């Protein structure tokens, strides 16, 4: 496979993951009566912490 195609497929999957995470965060916010932006910010903090621990 051409490297450009592999890269583009990876980017598309990453974008799908982003959409899935945002959808889950929206559901958590709605189900628990939390503010959407707060849930997204807390997810971002937790993700960054986990990312840094796995280096």
Image (tube, helix red, strand yellow):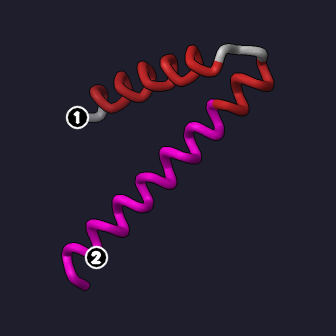
Which secondary structure, mark 2? helix
Q: Magenta segment: does it hold 10? A: yes
Please tell me in which quadrant of the rendered image residue 13 appears. bottom left
Q: Magenta segment: does it hold 44? A: no
Q: x and y percent of residue 49 in the render?
A: 36, 22
Q: Residue at x 35, y 63 (%)?
A: 10
Q: Which residue is mark 1?
A: 55
Relative to the observer, which residue lies in front, 49 or 23? 23
The 10 Å Cα crowd at callout 1, few under 14, some 14 to 19, many 20 or more, is few
Q: Residue at x 44, y 25 (%)?
A: 44
* Residue 20 left/right relative to 13: right
Q: Which residue is mark 2?
A: 5
- The residue range painted magenta reads 1-25
Give the dominant element type of the magenta stretch: helix, strand or loop. helix
Please tell me in which quadrant of the rendered image residue 7 appears. bottom left
Q: Residue at x 42, y 19 (%)?
A: 45
Whether 39 is drawn above or below 9: the answer is above
């Amino acid at each position: 496979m051409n490297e450009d195609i592999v890269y583009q497929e990876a980017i598309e999957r990453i974008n799908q993951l982003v959409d899935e995470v945002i959808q889950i965060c929206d559901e958590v916010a709605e189900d628990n009566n939390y503010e959407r932006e707060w849930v997204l910010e807390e997810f971002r903090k937790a993700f960054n912490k986990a990312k840094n621990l796995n280096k």
